[in-house]
Amino acid sequence: MKSLLASYGISTDGFRRALVCPLGKPVAESSALCTPTTAYAFSGGAGLARQLISGRAAIPLYELGWKSLGRSAS
């Protein structure tokens, strides 16, 4: 398993292409896990975490086309 810690700013095609190298395969063939509680460090983080957990936040990470994407509540 490979891990990549990334912040909220995953929104460019360049970043998507750059993920292929550390993943060793395209994003569409990879799985990801989002840990919403890491948002607590930001102003308004608790509200953002709630939106992430409920699937109501518009997060570029979610829109990269992962094979599967999970959310961890802790």
Image: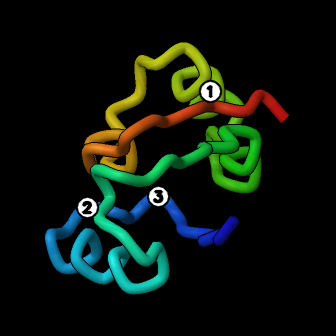
Which residue is denoted by mark 2 in the rendering? Answer: 11
Residue drawn at (49%, 36%) of the image: 69
Residue 20, x across and y down, in percent = 33, 76
Residue 1 placement, left or right of 8:
right
Residue 9, x across and y down, in percent = 38, 64
Measured in 3D between alpha carbons, the distance from the residue under mark 1 to the one under mark 2, in whole angstroms, is: 21 Å
Q: What kind of residue is marked 1?
A: Gly
Helix or strand or loop: what does disc 3 sit on? loop
Which residue is denoted by mark 1 in the rendering? Answer: 47
Q: Which image quarter: residue 21?
A: bottom left
Q: What kind of residue is marked 2?
A: Ser
Which residue is denoted by mark 3 in the rendering? Answer: 8
Farthest residue toward the left? 13
Helix or strand or loop: what does disc 2 sit on? loop
Of marks 1 and 2, the one in the foreground = 2
Q: Residues within 10 Å of mark 3 (few under 14, many from 20)?
A: few
Measured in 3D between alpha carbons, the distance from the residue under mark 3 to the one under mark 2, in whole angstroms, is: 8 Å
Pick whichever, 44 or 9, lies toward us.
9
Q: Residues within 10 Å of mark 2 (few under 14, many from 20)?
A: some
Residue drawn at (25%, 61%) of the image: 11
Q: Quadrant of the C terminus?
A: top right
Residue drawn at (35%, 52%) of the image: 29
Looking at the image, residue 73 lies above or below residue 2: above
